Image: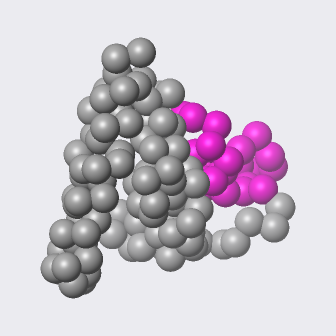
Amino acid sequence: MPEHLRANFARYLKTDGPGGAPPAGAPEVDLSGGSGQIATALWNQIDADTLVDRGVLVAGNPETCLRSIAIHEAAGVDELQFLMATETVPHDKVMSSIEMFGRHVIPELHKRKRR
């Protein structure tokens, strides 16, 4: 597991501590409710900026997107699929995001590939 993810989810991993207890001060989360409840519990504890900083979400301005993509590249990922929240974001904002991604992010990725 990459270190940036291990640091974020350490409280949910078994530890060498007494009885496999989570680190001291970790919030208590009930992980017995099935994958949907577990995912919701985890998701609700992490803010969007942290998800972007860790590369879980590729979002923000072009530089932020490129930094998030670089995290995946460093892990050996050579292909990503991007989705936009078209159900909750107004159409004009989605189109603006697609245009910005196409003008600024994709050309920079092509430059990196040629290096």
Pick the residue in front: 88 or 3: 88
On screen, residue 115 above or below 52: above
- Left or right for 78, reference 56: left
- Left or right for 89, reference 32: left
Residue drawn at point x = 43 percent, y = 30 percent: 73
- Left or right for 93, reference 40: left
Residue 110, by quadrant, is top left
Residue 34, by quadrant, is bottom left
* Rendered location of residue 81, percent (x, y): 23, 45
* Residues rendered magenta in the picture: 1-23
* Rendered location of residue 105, percent (x, y): 35, 46
Specify the quadrant that holds the N terminus: top right
Residue 16 visible in the current orientation: yes
Extreme residue toward the front, this view: 103
* Rendered location of residue 54, percent (x, y): 56, 50
Is 10 covered by the magenta stretch? yes
Residue 89, by quadrant, is bottom left
Pick the residue in front: 16 or 49: 49
Residue drawn at point x = 52 percent, y = 60 percent: 51
Pick the residue in front: 4 or 26: 4
Residue drawn at point x = 35 percent, y = 48 percent: 104
Pick the residue in front: 94 or 52: 94
* Rendered location of residue 97, percent (x, y): 28, 65
Specify the quadrant that holds the C terminus: top left
Residue drawn at point x = 26 percent, y = 77 percent: 93
Residue 32 visible in the current orientation: no
- Left or right for 32, reference 1: left
